[in-house]
Image: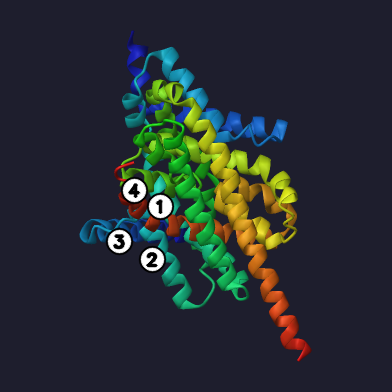
Amino acid sequence: MMLLTLSTEPLLWLPLTILFYLAGVWLQRRTRSPLANPTLVGIVLVGIALLLLRVSYAQYFSAVQLLHFLLGPATVALAIPMVQSLEHLRRGLLPTLAALFAGSVTGAVSAYALVRLCGGSRFIALSMLPKSLTTPIAMGVSDTIGGSASLTAVFAILAGILTAIALPMLLKTLRVPHLTATGLAAGTAGSGIAAASVIPLGPVPAAFAGIAIGVNGLMTALLAPVLARIFVHW
Amino acid sequence: MATLRSFLILLAAQLAGEALHRALHLPLPGPVLGMALLAAILLLRKREPDTALVQTSNGLLRWLGLLFIPAGAGVVANLGLLRSAWLPITVALLLSTALTVAATALVMQWLLRRGERVSITVEQR
């Protein structure tokens, strides 16, 4: 019976969460599939454990507060890779900004509109709106505009996985051979997960994916409250 | 000590971002403002960010995937919502992702080609 009290304590859930994440890392190394995303695997395993041990999400969340807190400084830390990749921007600043703006508006507006057109609630549409952004920024934006940060986290991860899977085929169909355009599209539509998938193509697409993650994050974070206000009656 | 100092820099930037967010009611979340502030400072200083800060940041970012799990696991509290709205969610994720890739890549490629054509004409003159 004493053991039962452990089921809501950080001492149980911190190591379990890390273990589940590492299981995802292991699975990804084994399968090399973007579907075996460690975060997604971790979320699913935590979900199963919570259901099995009959622990509520609120109890779990307060037990792993420490990990969640670190998301803040980790988001700030994105400034470093962003500044480092900006070196590559000397040439082509304007095309890059224009392409990022097009991607930012398309991603946010189409996400919201498609959910609404298919009969989804405004709450789900608002949670979908920032799905192309890097997960920490997406969650912050979702909170700000009245969506659900945890739904957005899952949408953002899924968007990243989808982008990583579909990018080569899509760009071939669209006849886009430019490596800079490939990198930008990966970072804009699928942030970190998709960016990881273009790293093998070389340092240029990787750098442009990095720029896209940071700049699209900032652009869409600024744009999202405006869009939420424009769509207030829809 | 250098690691601890770098961690302090990250937290201070986040704190400044959060203070700005609350004081000015800015639409950007505190950590995102903190990221923008730190990026601006690093760019204005015009030299490489110091190694300790780079290492601490990379260390933290290496575990970024783990840090999403506490919030992401919140879907277990939203399973009913996901089940009832699977169609709009699936359609929006698939189509919006494809549209975002297409818009970004096509605009970039079009502008780059235009730029190349312009610079070629300039060179020919």
The image position of residue A95, as x and y in percent, is: 59, 69
Q: Is residue A205 left or right of residue A58?
A: right
Q: Position of residue A176 (x, y in %)?
A: 72, 57
Q: Label 4 vs label 1: CA separation?
A: 27 Å
Q: Nearer the viewer, mark 1 or mark 2?
A: 2
Which residue is most to the top? A1
In contact (CB < 8 Å): disc 2 and disc 3: yes
Vertically, is B35 above or below A41? below
Disc 2/disc 3 C-alpha distance (Å): 8 Å
The amino acid on which the numbered mark 3 sits, given as a three-letter code, is Ala
**Residue at 32% in and 59% down:** B17
* Residue to which mark 2 is pinned: B37
> Is B83 or A15 nearer to us in this picture?
B83
Q: Is residue A50 left or right of residue A80?
A: left
Residue A73's disc is 1
Residue of label 4: A228
Where residue A222 appears, as percent x and y from the top left, is 38, 58
CB of mark 1 within 8 Å of CB of mark 3? no
The mark lying in front, picked from 3 and 4, is 4
- Marks 4 and 1 in Cβ contact (< 8 Å): no
Disc 4 residue type (three-letter): Ala
**Up/down of A180 relative to A142, above or below:** below
Q: Which mark is residue B16?
A: 3
**Cα distance between the residues tagged 2 and 4:** 25 Å
